[in-house]
Amino acid sequence: PAKSLGMDEGMTMVYRVKDPAMLKQFKVGDKVTFEAEEAASGYTVTKLQKSK
């Protein structure tokens, strides 16, 4: 869930990333936590890290 974005249930969504280079440390299937900002064009991930 992305409670800070007003989403209380888990779901699959497409997000933009502020800096595409931040994706290089991840592979398909990794669990992550993130921070995102809402804009008229959708959500943009501003911080991304692996979940424990």
Image (cartoon, grey):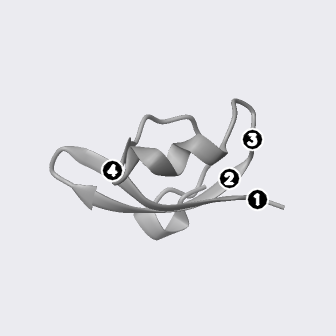
Which residue is labeled 1 in the image?
51
Q: Nearer the viewer, mark 4 or mark 3?
A: 3
Tell me the kind of residue under disc 4: Tyr
Separation of disc 4 and disc 1 at Cα? Answer: 20 Å
Task: Give the label on residue 30, or none.
Answer: 3
The residue at 75%/33% (across/down) is: 29
Label 3 to label 2, Cα distance in Å? 6 Å
Residue tagged 4: 43
Q: Is residue 30 left or right of residue 39?
A: right
Sequence-wise, which precedes: disc 1 or disc 3?
3
Is 37 left or right of 13, judged from the image as shown?
left
Q: Are marks 4 and 2 in contact (CB under 8 Å)?
A: no
Q: Label 2 near label 3: C-beta < 8 Å?
A: yes
The quadrant of the image that shows the N terminus is bottom right
Query: Which residue is located at x 84 percent, y 61 percent?
Result: 52
Q: Give neighbour class at mark 1: few <14, some 14-19, many 20+ (Cα, 10 Å).
A: few
Q: Position of residue 41 (x, y in %)?
A: 18, 44
Q: What amino acid does circle 1 point to? A: Ser
